């Protein structure tokens, strides 16, 4: 394997490890990501670490500041509200592009993910499955730029969904499950208008609930 291939593989490995840590909450918003610390913890030289941070910055998971280095973005309520408003516009569009191409196998996968959610899971597992559920509904969307934007928006708001779910508990999960079932039923009957409407309401309600809980944004933990 060439040096370039080795460094590329190292960058991908480091990026995946950091991605997992950010999405599961091990690395919190506001936390600095020092290249030397990452290289020591995950192995590798500064070059693949630097490239890994660039990859994560493109995904919305890391913010690189001139002369300061990298950190996980720390957002305020106004910024998160704006990101959710963007989701309200983009995700119904992605769903609309996807619906006609969803196969019976795709719908079965979506149903299985929802079955696992309804079995009762902790916050971390719920967030993983909730993301899988929505991304599965967008499987048929072939617009790469649209889907990159959707994924970036999910990445940027992951911590705040976790904090909110931890705060609101099982009552919130019941509401999410009901909304997921409405969306699934619309997908199964190929009703694009209802599916987009249910998805929009699902995202909008979450946005409104988040901004009613400023304590979520008071710290980066």
Image (tube, rainbow, N blue to C red):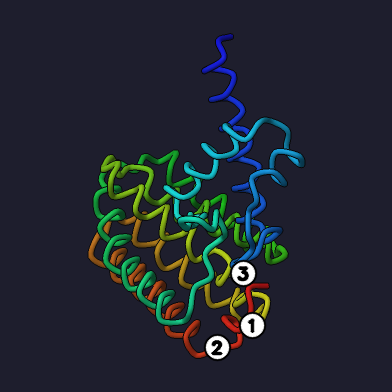
Can you say whether 7 is above or below 77 in the image?
above
Task: Tell me the CA gap for discs 3 and 1.
Answer: 10 Å
Task: Tell me the CA gap for discs 1 and 2.
Answer: 10 Å
In this view, which residue lies farthest toward the front?
Answer: 67
Picture quarter with the C terminus: bottom right
Please tell me how crowded label 2 is: few (under 14), some (14-19), or many (20+) other residues with Cα within 10 Å.
some
Tag 3 and tag 2, C-beta contact below 8 Å: no
Q: Earlier in the sequence, mark 3 or mark 1?
A: 3
Where is residue 149 shown, x and y percent of the image? Answer: 34, 53
Left or right of 61 in this view: 125: right
Please tell me how crowded label 3 is: few (under 14), some (14-19), or many (20+) other residues with Cα within 10 Å.
some
Picture quarter with the N terminus: top right
Front residue of 27/204: it is 27
The residue tagged 1 is 168
Q: Residue at 57%, 81% (x, y): give it.
A: 217
Front residue of 84/95: it is 84
The residue tagged 3 is 162
Front residue of 8/200: it is 8
- Mark 1: secondary structure: helix
Camera-side mark, 3 or 1: 3
The residue tagged 2 is 213
Left or right of 206 in this view: 24: right
């Amino acid at each position: 394997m060439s040096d370039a291939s080795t460094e590329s593989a190292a960058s991908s490995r480091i990026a995946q490890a950091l991605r997992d840590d950010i999405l599961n909450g091990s690395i919190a918003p506001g936390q600095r990501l020092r290249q030397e610390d990452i290289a020591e913890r995950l192995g590798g030289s500064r070059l693949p670490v630097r490239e890994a941070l660039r990859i994560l910055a493109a995904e919305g998971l890391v913010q690189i500041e001139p002369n300061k280095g990298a950190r996980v973005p720390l957002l305020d309520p106004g910024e998160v509200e704006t990101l959710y408003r963007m989701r309200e516009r983009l995700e119904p569009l992605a769903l609309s592009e996807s619906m006609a191409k969803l196969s019976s196998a795709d719908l079965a996968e979506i149903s299985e993910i929802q079955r696992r959610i309804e079995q009762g899971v902790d916050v971390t597992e719920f967030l993983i499955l909730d993301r899988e559920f929505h991304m599965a509904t967008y499987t048929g969307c072939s617009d790469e730029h649209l889907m990159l934007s959707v994924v970036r928006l999910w990445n940027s708001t992951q911590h705040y969904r976790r904090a909110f779910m931890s705060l609101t508990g099982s009552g919130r999960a019941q509401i999410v499950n009901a909304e997921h079932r409405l969306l699934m039923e619309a997908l199964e009957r190929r009703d694009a208008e209802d599916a987009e409407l249910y998805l929009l309401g699902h995202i909008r309600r979450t946005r409104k609930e988040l901004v009613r809980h400023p304590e979520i944004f008071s710290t980066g933990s």
